[in-house]
Image (tube, coloured by chain):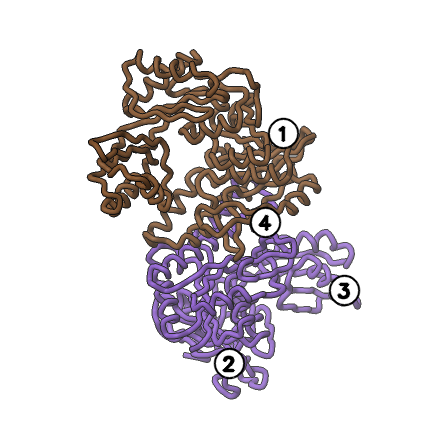
Chain colours: A brown, B purple
């Protein structure tokens, strides 16, 4: 007897067959005596189809109206899943974001959850019903429908688990859990039984793409036990929780991120406040700067080199070019032929051997390191994009082979 | 400067081109200095597509979940129309049924409006925005989404017009107004400039299918001026209002209704209370009985003959057959080879010539009358279905030719 939140993505509910597959998983969990809340995304390509409909009308749709439009996707999914559960004899009720109590700020298309009023969900659970909730959506103070942005359904599921103090929040995906590396790249990649929130955050932000980052942050904040598992094979997945085994296996995984570009600002006067000016500018335009390198150029000048998400490279270039005179740089270069490869594992800082093992593996493979960044639980290197898969394999072999 | 409610059906917003046609009509009305509330239905075949999706899952879907599913159709329309208005430079905001303040009873799939809280609409109008409202839907006391059933968007539009005391409620259709007969059947059918609520009600219930009956009843109750007009041609339509010209043209139209079947109960004992028993039974099963004929059979018995909607004929037959012993009838016959043809016009009762003109027209055409029914503003006859179009033409020629 437990309270379990289960989240299924859009491909898991894409058609009749898959909807019933999900319904069976949910019904089994309910039949075992558990209280179940299910969070679902829009079916398959529904969201893309709706975006295409809007694009036919206008190239600059009101964000508020986009949210009104997109929220229909999950509403269709929840109604159909509740029907499928009913067909299996499992009592169920569907709730939209606003009915489920998701209150957000007013930032349309990427709203953040302000609070969760779970009374309606609790009332429905008390009637022994499975509660099917539309992920990705909520309402703001004006009673306008908002959406949480990409990966928002993961966040919805964790928020419900946090509000209800659920025993477990299961994120169902098309893989069996979190792996030590992408199995499509590394043949010997292994599924992890358990991983910490911090490690998962590093892996997610580094491009492992198993779990949405915001959802992991929220789970960490409210100590929600997460499980990433397969909606196809009924095998235990990977548990994400606060502390694992303090002295256990050091390295949890190797991740590759190709969504990255390098910006170089050459010959900036070496004066106090220059970096501040430049990075304030990036921050003002919501561009996350990651690895930063400052190198000495000719006397009195320096080169400032840093990475930004690939999608932001054009904006970053434009903004910097417009302000080049303000900070007196000579020129700006953009390079998107790079990839970031990282090893992740808690307690890495107290094990200096990690960095040398990683760099040694790259050296043996003849791969040149362009930039390096370290944190308490990860080491990232920037290399040429076309060498990334080889790098991931070499590093994985060195630590986990 | 007026407050105008405009309603557009599903075919009027079926694609990009038609959406912009509607947006232009709305924007023009707004640009002329009017406050505008627009009510729209789901695009084209959307509702049918959603019903088909549900049918893939189950043959007996929960009515609550059907409403959850179907309500997405109008939500898509309002978002797209608001975007199209924005593209034309006309400030607009879309509202779902619950956001617009439609509170209904709890009868899913055919809910009735309990009250309308128009505060949000008024606030948006005060900001000089066109308010685009999802027709057909509301919420009940449990905050569950309900739908109003077929033709519900007409009712939504009239309810808003009533709540806001709008100057006019325009129902846009694919015809130019209300005609003296169906133009597809009668070549010389003429568009009416004006018609009373009662006449419109008779025409609607008799199969003219221009306006939903509930919406006309609501308009009559709250004295909402209605106009039926074309979304394709910008010409004046037909105004529906309380009193027209007391002594004006008598006959407003000729209508045909083929959605009718005749039930005959033969040799019922001629005792007090027999009719009561039989019609109570029909009422208990929500079957509307229309024309009733009682004829003497052999001594001590009578035949009871009446019409029911075509869709209800099987239920009526079954229920009567099961209870045949209770009221001692000999047998039951069902005949659906009939049609009802009616002339409608206020003040008919004080003009005895109407009936004789109608019957004369039918006699001249060699059409046999099987049953007759009259009210203050209509005369209906039941005839063979295959003679119905000929009958409509003959009667139209006699009165309006």
Gap between marks 4 and 1, in whole Å? 25 Å
**Are callouts 1 and 2 both on one chain?**
no
In the picture of the structure, the residue carrying the numbered disc 3 is B274
Mark 2 neighbour class, 10 Å CA radius: few under 14, some 14 to 19, many 20 or more: some
Q: Chain of mark 4?
A: A
- Pointer 2 and pointer 4 on the same chain: no
Measured as percent of width and height from the top left, residue A307 is found at 32, 33
Relative to B218, residue A330 above or below: above
The chain letter under disc 3 is B
Query: Is B96 on the left or on the right of B314, as rendered?
Result: left
| In the foreground, A191 or A123 | A191
Where residue A364 sits: x, y (%)?
Answer: 31, 11
Q: Nearer the viewer, mark 4 or mark 1?
A: 4
Q: In screen coordinates, is A337 left or right of B33?
A: left
Q: Earlier in the sequence, mark 3 or mark 2?
A: 3
User: Of circles 1 and 3, which is in front?
Assistant: 1
Quadrant of residue B118 within the rendered picture: bottom right
Name the mark nearer the viewer: 2 or 4: 4
On the same chain, marks 3 and 2? The answer is yes
Q: Residue at x 40, y 25 (%)?
A: A374
**Gap between marks 1 and 3, in whole Å?**
55 Å
Q: Which residue is mark 4?
A: A99
């Amino acid at each position: 007897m437990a309270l379990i939140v289960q989240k299924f993505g859009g491909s898991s509910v894409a058609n009749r067959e898959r909807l019933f597959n999900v319904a069976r998983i949910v019904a089994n969990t309910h039949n075992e005596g558990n209280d179940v809340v299910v969070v679902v995304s829009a079916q398959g390509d529904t969201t893309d189809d709706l975006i295409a409909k809007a694009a036919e009308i206008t190239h600059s749709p009101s964000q508020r109206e986009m949210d009104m439009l997109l929220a229909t996707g999950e509403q269709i999914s929840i109604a159909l899943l509740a029907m499928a559960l009913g067909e299996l004899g499992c009592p169920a009720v569907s709730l939209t974001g606003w009915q489920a109590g998701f209150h957000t700020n007013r930032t349309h298309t990427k709203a953040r959850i302000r609070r969760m009023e779970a009374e309606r969900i609790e009332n429905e659970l008390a009637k022994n019903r499975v509660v099917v909730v539309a992920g990705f959506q909520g309402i703001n103070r004006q009673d306008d429908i908002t959406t949480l942005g990409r990966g928002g359904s993961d966040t919805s599921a964790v928020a419900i688990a946090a509000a209800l103090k659920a025993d477990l929040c299961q994120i169902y995906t098309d893989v069996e859990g979190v792996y030590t590396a992408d199995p499509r790249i590394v043949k010997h990649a292994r599924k992890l039984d358990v991983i910490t929130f911090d490690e998962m955050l590093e892996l997610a932000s580094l491009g492992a793409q198993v779990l949405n980052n915001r959802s992991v942050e929220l789970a960490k904040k409210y100590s929600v036990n997460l499980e990433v598992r397969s909606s196809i094979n009924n095998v235990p997945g990977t548990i994400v929780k606060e502390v694992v085994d303090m002295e256990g296996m050091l390295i949890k995984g190797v991740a590759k991120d190709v969504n990255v570009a390098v910006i170089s600002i050459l010959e900036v006067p070496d004066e106090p406040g220059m970096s501040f000016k430049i990075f304030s500018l990036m921050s003002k335009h919501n561009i996350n700067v990651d690895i930063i390198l400052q190198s000495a150029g000719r006397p009195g000048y320096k080169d400032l080199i840093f990475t930004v998400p690939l999608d932001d490279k054009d904006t970053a270039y434009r903004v910097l070019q417009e302000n080049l005179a303000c900070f007196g740089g000579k020129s700006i270069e953009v390079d998107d032929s790079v990839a970031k490869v990282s090893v992740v594992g808690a307690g890495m800082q107290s094990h200096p051997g990690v960095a040398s093992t990683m760099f040694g593996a790259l050296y043996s493979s003849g791969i040149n390191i362009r930039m390096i960044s370290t944190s308490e639980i990860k080491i990232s290197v920037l290399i040429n994009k076309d060498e990334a898969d080889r790098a991931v394999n070499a590093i994985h072999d060195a630590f986990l082979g």
